[in-house]
Image (tube, rainbow, N blue to C red):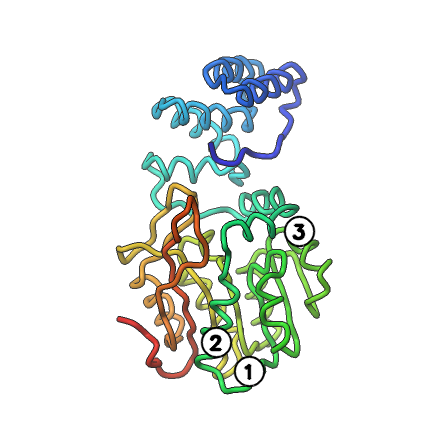
């Protein structure tokens, strides 16, 4: 099963108790029993979105596709902000949702939930996006590397900031998750940190005429379906000849797909189109894996773009 949602009470004590009892059944491996208890929970509290979502997840694991779809549709309808990710699960099952965009509420919940052990988890996956991005920026920037101001989009716990801090005069980090921002703040790396939705923050920065020499996004766009709006917003926040460096997970096609991991993979054609529409030219667009999962490298791209001309590193 995918990571479960944080518990949200139904307001009905008996329904809440059944929900907790179902989780205990899941922990013992009794998925069928857990599903039966959750059916009773939603009979008591028909608007209990958390229980509907959990019922969908359990039915999915039991191989009951239609039952999972029905439960997740109910959770989606009860939860417009998609706190639990029901819309994404429906998209994964090709249940009429298309390539569903993630809500800020869902992403915030997801990363708040995992903030405490995030660094340790990534270390176990051989995470290397910050190192790959630093190497890619070094390839196109004058030596010695010196960056006046940098915006770390989706800064998380500050792993990207740690890699670039020795080369940056003014370092700003933004993340939708207050839990992640708190972990980053504890490291003392950033000159300024803010918890905000990325697109809104970029708009505010552009409106305030903030212009960064580098905008970084290390493994952020696995949670962004369409790169065009964020690339356009980054372009408005860049100083002349500023750099936009980021990683994406990728796939053999040209568009965007929602993977079983509930992260997006972006084809090379989608990345190039988003940059072109934003008036940014790729200086480097190279295949690289930022981490391993289940013992295999995750296919990805490391991209550096600017308002300048395309560079030799762009691979067709």
Q: Position of residue 153 (x, y in %)?
A: 55, 63
Q: Position of residue 103 (x, y in %)?
A: 51, 46
Q: Do labels 2 and 1 touch, CB within 8 Å?
A: yes
Badge 2 or badge 1: first in the primary sequence: 2
Badge 1 or badge 3: first in the primary sequence: 1
Q: Residue at x 51, y 39 (%)?
A: 82
* Quarter of the picture holding the C terminus: bottom left
- How would you rate the neighbour count of disc 3 (Cα within 10 Å): few for under 14, some for 14-19, many for 20 or more? some
Q: Which residue is mark 1?
A: 145
Q: Residue at x 36, y 56 (%)?
A: 299
- Classify 176 as above or below 31: below
Figure label count: 3
The answer to whether 211 appears left or right of 300 in the picture is: right
Q: Residue at x 61, y 78 (%)?
A: 167
Which quadrant of the structure image shows residue 184? bottom right
Q: Which residue is mark 2?
A: 137
- How would you rate the neighbour count of disc 1 (Cα within 10 Å): few for under 14, some for 14-19, many for 20 or more? some
Measure the C-alpha gap from mark 2 to mark 1.
9 Å
Q: Which residue is mark 3?
A: 178
Secondary-structure class at tag 2: helix
- Classify 280 as above or below 69: below
Which quadrant of the structure image shows residue 165? bottom right
């Amino acid at each position: 099963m995918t990571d479960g949602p944080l518990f949200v009470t139904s307001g009905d004590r008996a329904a809440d108790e059944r929900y907790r009892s179902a989780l205990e059944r899941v922990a013992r491996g009794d998925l069928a029993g857990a599903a039966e208890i959750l059916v009773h929970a939603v009979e008591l509290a028909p608007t209990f979105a958390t229980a509907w979502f959990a019922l969908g997840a359990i039915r999915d694991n039991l191989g009951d596709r239609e039952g999972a779809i029905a439960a997740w549709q109910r959770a989606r309808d009860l939860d417009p902000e998609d706190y639990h990710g029901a819309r994404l699960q429906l998209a994964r099952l090709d249940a009429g949702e298309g390539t569903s965009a993630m809500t800020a509420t869902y992403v915030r919940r997801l990363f708040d939930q995992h903030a405490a052990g995030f660094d340790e988890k990534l270390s176990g996956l051989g995470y290397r996006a910050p190192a790959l991005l630093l190497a890619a920026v070094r390839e196109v920037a004058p030596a010695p590397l010196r960056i006046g101001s940098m915006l770390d989009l989706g800064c998380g716990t500050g792993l990207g900031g740690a890699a670039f801090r020795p080369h940056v005069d003014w370092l700003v980090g933004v993340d939708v998750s207050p839990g992640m921002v708190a972990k980053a703040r504890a490291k003392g790396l950033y000159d300024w940190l803010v918890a905000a939705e990325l697109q809104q923050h970029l708009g505010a920065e552009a409106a305030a005429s903030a212009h960064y020499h580098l905008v970084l996004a290390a493994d952020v766009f696995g949670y962004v379906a369409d790169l065009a709006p964020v690339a356009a917003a980054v372009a408005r926040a860049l100083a002349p000849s500023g750099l936009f460096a980021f990683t994406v997970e990728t796939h053999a096609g040209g568009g965007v797909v929602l993977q079983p991991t509930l992260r997006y993979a972006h084809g090379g054609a989608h990345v190039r189109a988003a940059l072109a529409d934003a008036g940014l030219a790729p200086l480097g667009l190279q295949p690289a894996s930022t981490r391993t999962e289940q013992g295999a490298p995750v296919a990805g791209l490391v991209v550096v773009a600017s308002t300048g001309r395309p560079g030799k590193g762009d691979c067709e």
